[in-house]
Image (cartoon, grey):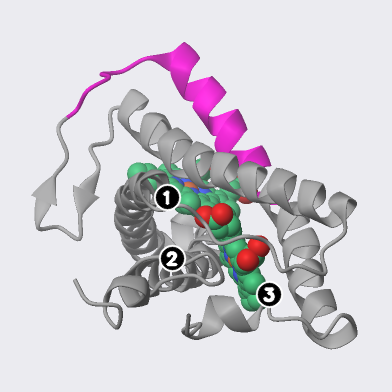
């Protein structure tokens, strides 16, 4: 690989490569849709909006399962590909706080789809992918497990929302107050 293409797809010391940037923004976009659809669909009335409710559950579960697959790809890619160094102006507390928030975001990004999946499967509802195929049922009916997964799936969105506030405030602080490249390098290619 020549020097033009190598750092373009992969991360360099100073910036995120195309694959990491694409995965970051696709996952971010999907998360907003999943949070919105999760809250909207659970609020729909089963009696008067039954068909719409069921359809939304199906879409939510299909997108959620896709997100789990993307997160596995993202984690593997992260292990194969070292993230860039933090921008040089970052103070030690900023480095520590962002590392903690990123790690917790990863935890939430796995906890949500896994708990969603376990919640469905343990209630005996198979998970289909947009009606095209059905994922194998690995769990079978299990009320105890269902209750735990439901608890996790209903509390994690609030935990995730708290992390977002920190994450997005951090990104805006670097852009507006510190005027460093932290946000820009997640958006566009950093020439080496
Ligand atoms: C408008 C929304 C968002 C903005 C402006 C934003 C901005 C950023 C920036 C600038 C970075 C790079 C930080 C660095 O270089 O140290 C980053 C990393 C990261 N973001 Fe976001 N982000 C957004 C939404 C999200 C969402 C919705 C999620 C997940 C739910 C997310 C998860 C992450 C994670 C896990 C990292 C660390 C990447 C890694 O270490 O692999 N972000 N984000
Ligand atoms: C990151 C991925 C996901 C996010 C952010 C997410 C988010 C949400 C939210 C916010 C709710 C509403 C919770 C409430 O207040 O009751 C919800 C409900 C639900 N989600 Fe997810 N979800 C994700 C993945 C999944 C997956 C993969 C499945 C199944 C395969 C799933 C199945 C469900 C079900 C069945 C409900 C309804 C629970 C109930 O009726 O009490 N979710 N989700």
Give the image location of residue 89, x and y in percent: 82, 69
Residue occupied by mark 3: 182
The image quadrant that residue 180 belongs to is bottom right
User: Ligand 1 closer than 8 Å to the CB at disc 3?
Assistant: yes
User: Ligand 1 closer than 8 Å to the CB at disc 1?
Assistant: yes
Report helix, strand or loop for mark 2. loop
The image quadrant that residue 162 belongs to is bottom right
Give the image location of residue 185, x and y in percent: 58, 79
**Is there a contact, CB below 8 Å, between mark 2 and mark 3?**
no
Residue occupied by mark 1: 78
Please check the rendered image and state whether residue 147 is part of the magenta-colored stretch, yes or no. yes
Dot 3, crowdedness within 10 Å: few (<14), some or many (≥20)? Answer: many
Dot 1, crowdedness within 10 Å: few (<14), some or many (≥20)? Answer: some
Q: Which mark is residue 11?
A: 2
Q: Residue furthest left?
A: 132
What is the spatial separation of the Cα atoms under label 1 and label 3, in whole angstroms? Answer: 18 Å
Q: In this picture, is 94 found above or below 137?
A: below
Of badges 2 and 3, the one in the foreground is 2
Q: Kindly tell me whether residue 11 is visible in this rendering.
A: yes
């Amino acid at each position: 690989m020549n020097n033009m293409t190598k750092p373009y797809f992969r991360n360099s010391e100073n910036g995120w490569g195309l694959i990491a940037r694409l995965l970051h923004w696709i996952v971010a976009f999907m998360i907003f849709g999943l949070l919105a659809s999760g809250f909207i669909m659970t609020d729909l009335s089963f009696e008067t909006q039954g068909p719409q409710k069921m359809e939304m559950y199906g879409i939510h579960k299909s997108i959620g399962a896709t997100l789990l697959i993307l997160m596995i790809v993202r984690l593997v890619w992260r292990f194969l590909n070292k993230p860039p160094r933090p921008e040089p102006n970052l103070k030690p507390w900023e480095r520590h706080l962002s590392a903690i928030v990123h790690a917790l975001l990863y935890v939430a990004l796995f906890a949500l789809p896994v708990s969603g999946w376990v919640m469905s499967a343990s209630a005996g509802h198979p998970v289909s992918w947009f009606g095209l195929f059905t994922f194998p049922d690995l769990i079978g009916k299990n009320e105890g497990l269902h209750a735990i997964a439901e608890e996790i799936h209903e509390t994690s969105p609030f935990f995730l929302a708290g992390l977002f506030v920190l994450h997005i405030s951090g990104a805006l602080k670097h852009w507006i107050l510190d005027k460093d490249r932290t946000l820009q390098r997640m958006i566009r290619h950093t020439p080496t």
